[in-house]
Every structure is written in C-alpha cells, then in structure tokens.
C-alpha cells in the first residue's frame, strides 16, 4: 500500500510540475515580451524594464523557470497588477467560497444519488429505475450554466424563493446556506444522475458475486447484505469519479459563481481574464489545478485502500 | 496647456479610471449589514460605483473618490446643490477674481481641522494648492491646476492665488474641486497619505475604510455650516450594479445608481417607498474615425459614415430612450453646449450611399471597429454596425478589455494605432467645457487623439477660450470648436448618457449636474434643507 | 458493401425498438436539418436590428420575442445551430483524428513512448477545462477559432486514452500476433486490423461527446470569450439574455432549449447505439 501511495504521489507531483511548467511556457511563448504580458497593457517602457530586471526576465529560460519554482515553493504567486496585493492572499480569500459550493454540490449529489442508485439496482426495471435512468441521462450532460440560468430565472427572479446573488451575510450561516441552494443544485444536478447510474451499475455487478450469494444462502437479511457488502464495493467507482469530478466541478462552479454573482475562484479568474490581470489568472489556475491533482490523487488512494485489486501497477482509472 | 502629463511610474491617467470600470472589484453583497432598514436620520447607506484608492487630492483618480472627499473636506468654493454648475462659497467667505491671473480669497474664521491641527488658515490654502504642482510630488492631477504659479499669504485668513497666465477653468476645476488640507497634519504623516486622511474639516469626518467594502463617515461636531443631516454615512464600494439593485431591494441601501436596463423593471415593480431619478451624466460617447488610415482618408467616406449612423436609434437601444442624442462632447447645461448638430441625429442613409458612390468606393467596404467590452458600448456598436450595413459598409467588431482598449491608440504602445479605423470612445467630462475638448487638440496626437484630428483653428480657439473669462466669448468659441470637429468627419457624437438612481422615499438626495451623489446635500425627507 | 447496408438496417431495426433511442435520433435529425436549412427556415435575418421593438414577448411576428436590439430570437437560435454544429464537427473530427493517432502509438508502440504519452495526456487533463480555456483566451484574446482550438487540445487526451486502452487490449490478440510473426508492418496492422475494431465504439463515443463540446462553446460564448458580436451562438444569446433578464426572460428561455435538446438527443441516441452495437462497452462508460 505504501509503495502504491508513494508511486502515486510521485506521479501526481510530476504531473503538477509539468502543468505548472506548461503555464509558465505559455506566457513566454506568446508574442511580445513577457513583461508586457505579465503587466498587461498598463506596461510603460520604464515599468517593463523595471519588472524585467526584478523578475530576471533577461536571464536564460531555465534560470527563470527555477526562480519561478522557488517562488512557488515559498508560496509567492506574484502580485496583482491593479491592487498590488499578493496573489496568494487574493486567491485564498476567495477559495473558501468555491469550496463551500463544490462540497455542498457533491454532498447533495451523493446523498441523493447513492440511495437512488441503490434502489434502482435492487428494484431493477421498476418505474423508479426507468425514470431515474432517463432523468440521469438527461441531466448529466446539460451544461450546468443553463441549469443555473433557468433556476435563477424561475426560482429567484420570478418566484423569489431564493436569493439571486451573493454568498450571504458574513457570519450568518442560515443566510449563507440559502445562498448556496440554487448554485449547488445547478452544479450538482448532473452528478445525481451520474452517481445513481454508477452505483446501480456497480451494485448489479457485485450482487451476482460469489460471496454475496453465499451470504444470501446463509440467510442474512437482504438489507444487511446490501449495506455491508454490496454498497462497500459499489462505492469504489463512485469515489473515483468524485475525485475526477472535483475538476469538472471547479469548471461548473465558475459558471455558477458568475450566474449567481457569488464570490469565488471562478469569478476571480473570469474577471482576471477580462482585465488581463495575468498574475491572478496564473495564480487561480495553478491553485485549482493543484486541487484537481490532489483530489484525483486522494481518490485513487482511497480507492486502492478499499479495493486491493486496484493496487496493481499501471492500473488507474 | 491641456496636455495630460503622464506622471509617476505607473502612467495611470485619470481618464483610465474615470471610466466606469465595472470589473475592478468583486460583488460584495456578503458584506452588507443584516439590518433591514437604515434608521431614519441616523445613517445613510449609499452605493459608490467603485472603491476609493486614495483620498489625497494630488492623486485621486475617479468620481468615486470625489463623492467621498467632497463630504469630508472643504474647498474654497463648492458647487451649488441645485443641479447647475454654479458655485457658492464654502471655506472662503470672500473669493474674487481681481484680474485674469489673480484671485483673492479670505477664509471664514473658526474652521477647525478634526485632528487637532487647529484652525484653517491661508497658509493651509497655500500648502494645499502648491503641493499639487510641486514637481517632487509627481501629482497626477497637476494639470488641473492649469497655470497656477503660487499662492501669496497676506495674513492669517487671506491671500491671493497667482497664475502665470489666464486660465479660465481655474474656478470650476481647481478652486471648486480641490480641498484645503492642514499643512501641519499632512506634513506630520510624511507629506502624503492614502485612504486615511490625517485631517478633515467638512460636515462629515472620515471614520474608517474597509478595503473593497465600504467607507464610513461620521458627523463632524465642529462643523460650522448647515448641520450635517446624518450621524453616519456608509458608502459601499459596489462595482456590480446588479448587486447594488438587489441590495436596495433587500432594504440594505438607501440610494444606488442602477443600470439603464433596470429602470423599466423598477418602474413596473417599484420597491416599497422608493422612487427613481434619472440624471444626465457628464459622460461623452462618440464614434471616432482614424483619418490617417487609408480606408478613411477620403473625407467623403467619413462623411458618409456620419450620415449612415442613426444616432437616434443607437441612443434608443443603448439607453432605453432615457438619454438624448448628444450635441457634442459638451453636455447640455454646460457652457459651450451647441444647440444642434450639423448632421441630423437620424442621419440620412441615402446621402451616405450617394457620398460613397461619389468617392468611388467599391462596396461592400469592410472596416474594423474597436470597442471596449462594456455592455452599453457593445449595444451601441451593434446598432452602428447595422446602420452601416444598410449603406454597404461591413463592420467587424473587435472587442477589447478595458486595459487593452485604452492603450490601443497610444503611440508609445507600438504601431497598432495606425491600423485603427473606427472605434467607440467614451470618457467622463468635468466641471468645465475645456476639459471636454482638450483631448482633441494637436498636442494630444499620439496620446488620446486617436482620430489624428488636427486643426489649426481648433487649437487656437482651445487656447483662447481657456485664457478668457468672458463667458459669452467662451460659449461661442466652444460651439465653433465642436462644429469644426464635426466638419472634419472624424466624429459622430452619440450621447452623454444618463445616471439613473433609485432612492428611498425617506431620503431627499442631491446630485451634481453630471449625476454624482452630493452627500452634503442629502437630507432625511422630512427635514427642511 | 452489402454487409454494411445490412449492418445499418439491423441497427435501425434495433433502434426502433428503443423509444429513447428513437427519440434521440429524431431530435438529432431535426437539429441537423434546422441548422443546415436555417436560412430557409428563419423568419427574419438574425442580424436585423429593430431598435424600437426590443425585448418584446413572443408575438405572431416574433415567435420567441426579440432581444435587446430588436433582433428575432427564433432566427438567432436557428442560426446558432450552425455555429454549434460547426464547432462540434471541426473540434471532434480533429481531436478524434489526432487522438486516434496518438492513442494507437501509445497502445502499440514501445513502452517508453506509452509512458511519455500517458504523462502528457494526464498533464493536459489535470487542468480544469474551462480554467485552461480561460487562461489561453487571456493570452490570445477571444475568438471562435481559439475556442475550437482549446476544445481540441482538451479533447485529444480523452480520445487518445480510450484508443490506447482498446489498442492494448487488441494488441495481444492471436490474430495480431500472427500477423506480426509474419512480418506485417505496423501501419498495416493498425490500419487494417485495429482501426476497424475500434472505429464503431469510437464514433459512438464521439457522438456522445457532441453535447459536451457544444456546451463548452456555449459556455465560453456565454462568458463573452467566443463568437464576436453580432454573431448568434446559443451561448451569446444566453449572455445577452442574462444582462437583460429582468426586462425579458425570453432570450434565456429560448437560448437554453436548443442546448438541452442537443444534450438529450445525442446522449439518448449514443447510449442506444452503444447498447446495440457493443454491450461490453457499457462497463467502460464510467471512464472519461
């Protein structure tokens, strides 16, 4: 297990480094000098020269790359072009809002999806099963921002059941919860179906397994069988998908934040892109990528811990 | 005269920020208090369209800042709260132009600075003005002082402001705008400050500033003028107009500038006890044409484009019928505003086609139009695009973000200005017509004069109008200048826009002629002013 | 030749038995036809500005109302289909082609190449897609071609991985081993044996990818980073509608419907086809 974890960690690190280098390279491959790109259109010749020198942009590329990593290791993501604040401060200020949204969405989706998938597996081809199947397919691929827009239009603007924007008052948990409802639904709706299908499929596979049959033969109540054996194993692919899902959730969260005017990394990134605030762009993308890699890594580990079969080398989802 | 000196390492020109930047901050609905209703007479909760970055006069860059500092500081003169550009005495009890280059003033007695620096004296006036033109200060706003030479102090309360040469805009742009600060207070904090002023003397005092959230002011107990109406004023920095609208509806704001498109919905569903006020704004929107670009060198082509653009339709679409077609950069109500445009607002598609034919242009003519990614301007250019299409001109719209757009026409950014053809421009004027037109002089070539417009008579009139204090003369000259601009074919003036505000009925607000909140004039509705 | 036709008719027959699949097919066909014949079907020019009739509710003249410039929403939606399909066609075919190539190389080639390519794929996939798209657009500026390019770059690893897995599975097939023993060239093996076996499932996967690709373009246009005005894309219609949400809900209602239909249509159809043609693939469905 340890060997597996170590190997996985190394792989994750390599990927992260490559991703970061790719971002770094993108800035330098762009036409025009990096100082202009980094400073954006506010660059005056004097400012550019100052920045070039300060950042060592006149140094060979490899030297620059290592300085970049050194800064990164220290947690220095650069400085916001407009407000002179540390990018790391700005990014980590906004991160909690996005995490709250993503976790709520995943939590909600899991809470709904797992039981739904379970019942669908147990009562195959019942009405519930069929309806779930159709709905899941329907919701899985509809772009989340379309769902968000419709929710906004119907439930917030027309019916006024929920607030249309913001994250809620600081310190007021109930208010913040109300503000989470619509964005989380928009984000998590597709996942309910996905998880349900996945759980159903895995459970069907597992329910025919030998040791389940044995347990049944021994007269164990069906419910015990389901909860103690089948569900355990059926959860595995779900966990994997959740790990990968965080990545796509971050993308979906961006839209939810924009449609509902919620603070968060997505909104931060969007505005930074529009204002060509490159340090913030790079900082946000770095942090979210790191999260994605981390969550994939964690879900791989959990998976491997729960199912020893997966620890063979080269096996990855 | 009139050239914006780029100062300091960041080359931030005031115009870069005087534009309503809707993207410089984040929606902060989460920072609003949980209180549902502002307590009548005690607190005022109002939206500012942007956060302040400094309150130090040499460096302030936006209307957002002037809204704040006009409440906490005094100037020699202030604009009246009656919707005109007329001035009245504020810190001064006497202010007269002795001649073209001398202004005599005498301060009222007993005006105390809040931090213990004592009474306001003529020396403070000298300090406040001279520091802005001090070369070591690198003040962005130095050009606003015009030809200021120095201030002579005669005695404790009186002095004379001396200019090097006549500068007709001195009163509106300098004397009625720039505050008097205490020499002692400012030097004790090192000669300059940021968002926390070391001394205030206005009806309100600065209490606190929370970055990207709000600025809090409180009543000044030592204020000698008409009593400040509120105990506290909370000014929320909300760049997102929609968030501000939501906040108003939730009862958390008493007054907020809203978007043009929300005026209709609010009228249909007015929140309880509220009313709308739609004020003209001091902005200026126009379609510019780079006359040195080969496609636009022929005057007939530019004239055709002027005739092709249906300004009435553009204004209707962009401002929902709330604004009017502009007579030029100088807005209605200001000295120098024209009474008509040379080319009618509706344009004339037939004339446009005839001109293009006469010029021998092969249709369709493809032109590029650069525009800022601002919702208002994007709407306007799409209507323009359609108008031009009808006469055979195909327009490709290139959207740029704010920062890129603002540097496109500048020579120092590179050669790209030569490729510019059509562009949609907007900027915010000030209290004097000179400020609306100075950007089109020959001196501005390579900076803000992207049309590459250059006319001798225009330049000459610009200098003359600035140097004379005869209002009628200036009026005539500024009108003529705008005629010259239109005759050149480089401009199609669109509108001066509007600033709609939604206000609680418990408040009686006051706004400047260009639509900004004048906090001093805000009163609870029951009180008499 | 005849076996192909037989294949097709058998497929269609099976499809007819599956109501969802049939529905998907109908929806897809309708979308394709309305987009191709948009010029004939649209009641108005999608670009025609009519300022004095803006943000109207549906009327006989404008079945889905008008947008903030008085343009007919229905016509814009119909033409928006063209953008969506163009993006889907170009992006998917290019990324499929390149992914196929790279995947086969990884699956069939030497181990070091495989390792290298896998790491590359995983790196590209480690970016949350839209964040990556935003970063690229930040550097190059918005345009439809940039959007297509980004979609291609982020899709290649996905296809490549699947191709790789399939190729690896087939590589040790007896038939293939025999061919290699006889000295058949790599390209012959790949072209004649491996490719036909993975083509069908790959195409099905590609068709199920259409909603994601169209959704991506719509998303980026919604953010103002895709098509430039006044072009109508479903995403830009939604973007405009969002700004004027309180004035009229119709642009949003109208802009979202085609996206939902595209999703339902292609997904139902794709799932059906997959169940018919290769039941084994059901299990692999979770891997993307």
Image (cartoon, helix red, strand yellow):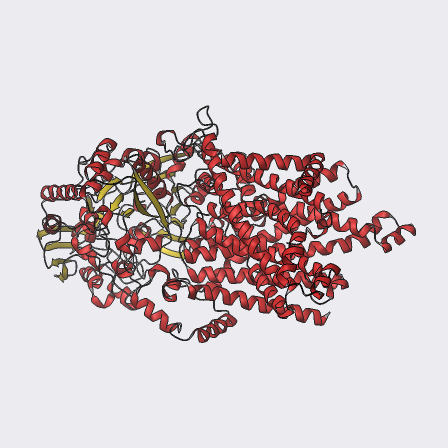
* Quadrant housing the N terminus of chain A: bottom right
Between C183 and A223, which is closer to the camera in this rendering? Answer: C183
Between B135 and C211, which is closer to the camera in this rendering? Answer: C211
Whole-percent x, y for residue B189 in the image: 31, 67
Vertical comparison of A76 with B1: above or below: below
Q: Residue furthest front?
A: C182
Between C103 and B144, which is closer to the camera in this rendering? Answer: C103
Q: Is residue B156 visible?
A: yes
Whole-percent x, y for residue C9 in the image: 68, 37
Q: How many marks?
A: 0
Between C101 and B475, which is closer to the camera in this rendering? Answer: C101
In the displayed structure image, the side of residue A155 where residue B140 appears, left or right: left
Vertical comparison of B200 with C68: above or below: below
In the displayed structure image, the side of residue C221 where residue B471 appears, left or right: left
In the displayed structure image, the side of residue C123 where residue B318 appears, left or right: left
Whole-percent x, y for residue C66 in the image: 43, 31
Q: Residue at 45% of width from left, 51% of height from top?
A: C145
Q: Residue furthest top?
A: C60
Q: Residue at 25% of width from left, 59% of height from top?
A: B411
Whole-percent x, y for residue B133 in the image: 20, 62
Q: Residue at 13% of width from left, 53% of height from top?
A: B167
Vertical comparison of B114 with B261: above or below: below
Name the quadrant containing residue A211: bottom right
* Quadrant housing the C terminus of chain A: bottom right
Q: Is residue B72 visible?
A: no
Q: Residue at 59% of width from left, 69% of height from top?
A: A13
Q: Residue furthest left?
A: B99
């Amino acid at each position: 297990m340890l060997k597996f974890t170590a190997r996985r960690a190394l792989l994750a690190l390599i990927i992260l480094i490559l991703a970061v280098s790719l971002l770094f390279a993108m800035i330098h491959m762009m036409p025009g000098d990096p100082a202009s790109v980094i400073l954006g259109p506010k660059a005056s010749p004097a400012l550019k020269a100052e920045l070039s020198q300060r950042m060592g942009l006149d140094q060979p590329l490899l030297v620059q790359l290592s300085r970049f990593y050194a800064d990164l290791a220290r947690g220095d993501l650069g400085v916001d072009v407009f407000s002179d604040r540390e990018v790391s401060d700005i990014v980590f200020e906004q991160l909690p809002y996005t995490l709250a949204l993503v976790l709520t969405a995943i939590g909600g989706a899991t809470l709904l999806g797992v039981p739904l998938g379970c019942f669908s597996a147990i009562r195959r081809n019942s009405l519930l099963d069929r309806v779930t199947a159709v709905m899941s397919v329907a919701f899985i691929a509809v772009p989340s921002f379309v769902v968000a827009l419709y929710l906004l239009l119907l439930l917030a603007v027309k019916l006024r059941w929920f607030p249309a924007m913001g994250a809620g008052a600081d310190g007021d948990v109930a208010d913040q919860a109300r503000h989470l409802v619509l964005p989380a639904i928009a984000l998590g709706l597709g996942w309910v179906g996905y998880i349900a299908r996945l759980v159903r499929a895995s459970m069907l596979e597992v329910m025919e397994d030998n040791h389940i049959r044995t347990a049944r033969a021994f007269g164990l109540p069906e419910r015990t069988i389901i909860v103690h054996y089948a569900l355990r194993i059926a959860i595995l692919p779900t966990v994997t998908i959740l790990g990968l899902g965080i990545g796509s959730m971050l993308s979906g969260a961006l839209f939810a934040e924009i449609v509902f005017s919620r603070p968060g990394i997505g909104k931060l990134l969007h505005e930074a892109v529009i204002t060509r605030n490159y340090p913030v762009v790079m900082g946000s993308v770095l942090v979210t990528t790191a999260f994605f890699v981390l969550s994939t890594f964690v879900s791989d580990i959990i998976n491997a811990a729960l199912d020893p079969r997966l620890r063979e080398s080269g096996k990855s989802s | 005269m009139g050239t914006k000196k780029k100062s300091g390492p960041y080359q931030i020109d005031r115009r870069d920020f005087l534009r309503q930047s809707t993207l410089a901050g984040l929606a902060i609905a989460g920072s609003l208090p949980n209180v549902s209703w502002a307590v009548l007479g005690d607190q005022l909760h109002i939206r500012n369209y942007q956060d302040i970055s400094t309150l130090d006069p040499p460096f302030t860059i936006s209307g957002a800042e002037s809204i704040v500092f006009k409440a906490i500081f005094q100037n020699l003169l202030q604009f009246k709260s009656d919707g005109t550009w007329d001035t009245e005495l504020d810190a001064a009890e006497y202010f007269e132009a002795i001649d073209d280059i001398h202004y005599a003033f005498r301060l009222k007695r007993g005006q105390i600075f809040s931090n213990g620096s004592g009474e306001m004296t003529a020396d403070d006036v000298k300090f406040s003005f001279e520091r802005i033109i001090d070369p070591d200060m690198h003040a962005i706003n130095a050009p606003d002082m015009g030809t200021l030479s120095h201030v002579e102090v005669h005695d404790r309360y009186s002095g004379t402001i001396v200019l090097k040469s006549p500068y007709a805009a001195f009163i509106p742009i300098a004397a009625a705008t720039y505050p008097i600060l205490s020499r002692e207070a400012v030097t004790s904090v090192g000669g300059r400050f940021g968002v926390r002023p070391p001394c205030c003397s206005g009806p309100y005092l600065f209490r606190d500033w929370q970055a990207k959230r709000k600025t809090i002011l409180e009543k000044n107990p030592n204020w000698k003028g008409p009593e400040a109406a509120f105990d506290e004023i909370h000014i929320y920095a909300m760049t997102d107009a929609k968030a501000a609208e939501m906040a108003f509806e939730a009862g958390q704001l008493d007054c907020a500038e809203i978007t043009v498109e929300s005026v209709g919905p609010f009228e249909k569903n007015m929140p309880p006890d509220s009313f709308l006020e739609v004020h003209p704004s001091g902005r200026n929107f126009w379609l510019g044409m780079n006359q040195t670009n080969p496609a636009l060198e022929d005057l007939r082509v530019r004239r055709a484009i002027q005739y092709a653009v249906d300004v009435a339709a553009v204004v209707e679409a962009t401002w929902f019928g709330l604004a009017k077609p502009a007579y030029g950069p100088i807005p209605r109500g200001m000295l120098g505003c024209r009474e008509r445009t040379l080319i009618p607002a509706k344009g004339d598609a037939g004339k446009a086609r005839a001109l293009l034919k006469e010029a021998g242009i092969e249709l369709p003519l493809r032109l590029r139009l650069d525009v800022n990614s601002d919702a208002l301007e994007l709407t306007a250019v799409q209507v323009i695009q359609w108008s031009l299409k009808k006469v055979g001109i195909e327009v490709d719209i290139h959207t740029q973000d704010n920062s890129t757009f603002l540097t496109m026409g500048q020579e120092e950014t590179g050669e790209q200005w030569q490729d510019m053809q059509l562009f949609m421009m907007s900027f915010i004027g000030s209290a004097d017509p000179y400020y609306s037109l100075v950007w089109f002089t020959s001196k501005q070539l390579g900076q803000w004069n992207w049309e590459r417009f250059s006319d001798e008579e225009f330049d000459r009139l610009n200098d003359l109008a600035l140097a004379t204090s005869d209002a009628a003369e200036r009026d005539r000259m500024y009108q003529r200048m705008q005629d010259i601009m239109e005759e050149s074919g480089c401009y199609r003036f669109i509108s001066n826009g509007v600033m709609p505000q939604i206000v609680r009925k418990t408040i009686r607000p006051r706004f400047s002629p260009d639509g900004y909140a004048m906090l001093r004039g805000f009163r609870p509705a029951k009180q008499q002013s | 030749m005849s076996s192909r036709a037989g294949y097709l008719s058998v497929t269609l027959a099976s499809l007819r038995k599956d109501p969802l699949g049939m529905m998907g097919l109908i929806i897809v066909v309708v979308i394709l036809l309305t987009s191709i014949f948009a010029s004939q079907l649209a009641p108005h020019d999608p670009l025609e500005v009519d300022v004095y009739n803006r943000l109207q509710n549906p009327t006989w003249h404008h079945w889905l109302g008008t947008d903030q410039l008085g343009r007919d929403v229905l016509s814009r939606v119909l033409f928006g289909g063209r953008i969506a399909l163009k993006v889907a066609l170009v992006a998917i075919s290019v990324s499929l082609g390149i992914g196929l190539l790279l995947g086969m190389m990884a699956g069939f080639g030497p181990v070091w190449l495989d390792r290298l390519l896998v790491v590359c794929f995983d790196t590209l996939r480690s970016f949350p897609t839209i964040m990556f798209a935003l970063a690229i657009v930040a550097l190059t500026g918005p345009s439809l071609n940039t959007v297509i390019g980004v979609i291609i770059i982020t899709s290649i690893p996905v296809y490549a991985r699947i191709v790789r897995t399939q190729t690896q599975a087939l590589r040790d097939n007896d038939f293939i081993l025999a061919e290699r023993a006889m000295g058949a060239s790599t390209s012959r093996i790949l072209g004649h044996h491996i490719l036909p076996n993975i083509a069908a499932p790959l195409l099905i996967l590609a068709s199920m990818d259409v909603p994601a690709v169209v959704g991506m373009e719509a998303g980026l246009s919604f953010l103002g980073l895709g098509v430039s005005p006044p072009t109508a894309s479903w995403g830009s219609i939604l973007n405009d509608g969002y700004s004027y949400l309180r004035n009229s809900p119709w642009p949003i209602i109208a802009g979202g419907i085609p996206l939902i239909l595209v999703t339902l249509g292609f997904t139902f159809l794709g799932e059906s086809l997959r169940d018919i043609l290769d039941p084994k693939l059901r299990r692999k469905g979770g891997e993307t």
